[in-house]
Image: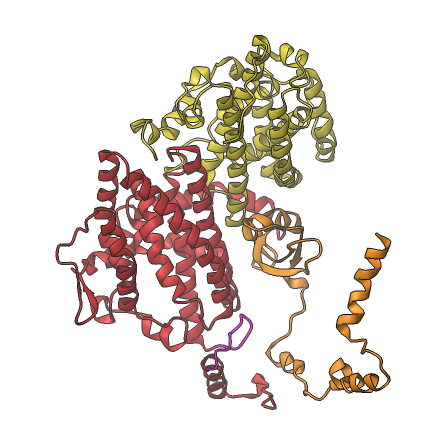
Chain colours: A yellow, B red, C orange
Amino acid sequence: MKMVDVKPMNKDYQSSLISLLYQLADDDFILAYRGSEWLGLAPHIEEDVAFSSISQDTMGHAAMFYQLLSDLGEGDVDDLAHARPAKVRKNAILLEMVNGPGHYLSKPSYDWAFAVVRNYFYVQAKKVRMESLKNSSYDPLANAALKVNMELYYHLLHWKTWFVQLMQAGGEARKRMEDAIHRVWDDFAGVLSLGPLGKELATFKIIESENILKGKWKQSMKPVFDSVNLLMPEEFGTQSGDGRKGVHIKDLEDALLTLREVYQTDPAASW
Amino acid sequence: MSDVIFSNQLTEQEKYGHFLKRIEAGEKIEADDWMPDEYRFTLIKLISMHGISEIMGALPEKEWVPKAPSLKRKLGIMAKVQDEMGHGQLLLRVAEDLMKPLGKTREDIMEDLFSGRLKFHNVFHMEAPTWGDAGLIGWLVDGAAIISQTNMLNASYGPYARALKRICAEEVFHAQHGEAIIMALAEGTNEQRTMVQEAVNRWWEALLMFFGPADASTTGTSKQDITIKYRIRTKTNEELRQDFFSKYIPRVLSLGLTLPDETMHFDKEKEVWVYKQPDWNRFKEIIKNNGPKSKDRLELRKTAYIENQWVREALNMAK
Amino acid sequence: MSSEGFYQEFEVFSKRSDTAPLQYQFSLLAPNSELALIMAQENFMRREPVSDIWVVKRSDIRKMNCEEKQSLQRLDNKDYRNTKGYGYLKKKWRHYEQGMLDEKEILSWGEEKKRENG
């Protein structure tokens, strides 16, 4: 166990820091969970193996962010990941959405186009955040961002390759990709949001402002969009609600029932 | 050294003799080398079944990947099931290269699986209803797999031997991953202990069946003689089963667990484990896709295959 | 379909570190080299360090067949290509009270230079 610096922190500073950490941890955790449902069901075997590594990395990042929360007195990492009810979770709604109709054990009508678009757009947003967090005023977070960032080069390369190839394939693939892109636009503002304490986060120099980060995201994506003839929308939506405020859809409730099924039979037991 | 052989000038009989001499000398046969049809077909059957069993084997454990009870367990089981897919990849590549001269590809392997022509291992037709089963699969099913796979590490077919070397190295992690889950449960609450014991009871017969019948008289066919003749493996089914008992029974008992077979004991004179035979008729039914979860798992694999058809078509260079 | 479909064969090579030689790993199926490249590491090198990866379409590789491999054999009479054929010089130089500049000695010069410069 590493020693944690527990010198008293400005109360407002601490609450905005914690609000950001919950967003980072919950985003990665739920998307890695969705990735774990894909295991064994990807378009071909080699891709299955590659995708699983990304899901593992992502859950590993979630564990690091939960640990930072734990160090700030928020509780045990496994309780943070498994026990918290939907209404206190801060992940973006886009990331909790099911992979497609059906269940991971029965008739999974999973949508690879949605997987590619959601993951690609999210990983780029995460990359922009990590780059910014490298200069965070909260050192433990800056250190974590430096580590997490290392693994994002591969995640980006992987999803970008799929994105570009399926976009350029034309025909049915192009149509499926565009449908997926529209679904993602509808809720992508929820991913780029820093939540109700976004202003404070920037003021305390924990992370740059939402607008700066959004600009950087667009700037990184623009050349790729141009290369596949895709227009960058002016604004993105939060059609399903704002996950940063604890608003969620039924998909998250269902996911929580599954992911804590064993844990909740005895949260105090050692597993 | 001076024995320069141009195989196109030899008769089939001479080629066969030369082939046997090579494997007897411990040489490795490679994909493009001449090999007798019997050898090729035996390997295709063995390795495609082995490969597809890894892919199908990911499914009973997959159920527990999203449900694993802690972050550490979620990561561990994700990595483990990923490896199963990875082993499937390695083995199917080996089988695909052997099938290439017959004009068959991975798509044919999948089609054969769906149609029932290609069988998968009996253990992967079984139910895995609790977290205890997830641990038990890692511990004992992978333990049994290690016993049978290490027996083929020196297989005369080079690509298979090389794939197995990679696989066995990872199986060591699988076994320890399984042991860790079982150990935590065995040292845990009464409910957790019950969970392991019930999993042992549920899986025992399938584990006995894992190594196949002792000889052809039990089920009508057995490939073990051919695989031994061609130096693909060295031990018989029964020898492997006995090895499994020797390695694992003492460990199962040491954790305070019991086996669902009161007759089970070690005969010191004959130096063999004496056990109650599983129902081999049931075994035949299970591998004919009439096991408890056969249809569900095939359906799941097929759904995934069909749902992603558009991806493969989009990136198909031949279109 | 088998040669030009979604499932094309790629051979994967990798380097463990910048100074390591390229090593053959295994083969995989992918629709093109870009996708082959992004699958290579996680399929074959999940648990080891990697510093570079090459993927090569199998159809671009000219392999030897069984007969051609016979051309790799040669007689063990080529000492004149190796230092082994010049071992007698050691004794000769001793006569002139000089040491033999053998492989170990000569290859050590590079290191020494570095040390002098550094």
Q: Residue furthest left?
A: B262
* Vertical order, B174 against C96 (above or below): above
In the rendered view of the protein, which quadrant contains the C terminus of chain A? top left
A36 on left or right of A175: left
Residue B297 position by quadrant: top left
Does residue C16 appear in this view?
yes
Q: Residue furthest front?
A: C97
Locate residue A247, reporting x and y percent.
48, 14
Q: Residue furthest bottom?
A: B2
Residue positioned 54% across, 75% down in the render? B33
Residue positioned 57% across, 32% down in the render? A119
Q: Which residues are magenta?
A: B25-35
Does residue B118 appear in this view?
no
Locate residue A173, reporting x and y percent.
59, 38
Residue B62 position by quadrant: top left
Residue B66 position by quadrant: top left
Locate residue A241, reporting x and y percent.
52, 14
Q: Nearer the viewer, residue A155 or A168?
A: A155
Whether A239 is among the magenta residues is: no
Instruction: Examine the residues drawn in magenta and state their main secondary structure.
Output: loop
Q: Nearer the viewer, residue C98 or A23?
A: C98
Q: How many marks?
A: 0
Locate residue A50, reporting x and y percent.
55, 45
Q: Nearer the viewer, residue A259 or B165?
A: B165
* Vertical order, A256 against B236 (above or below): above
Residue positioned 80% across, 70% down in the render? C106
* Vertical order, C89 against C6 (above or below): below
A209 on left or right of A87: right
B129 on left or right of B28: left
Q: Nearer the viewer, residue B312 or B129?
A: B129
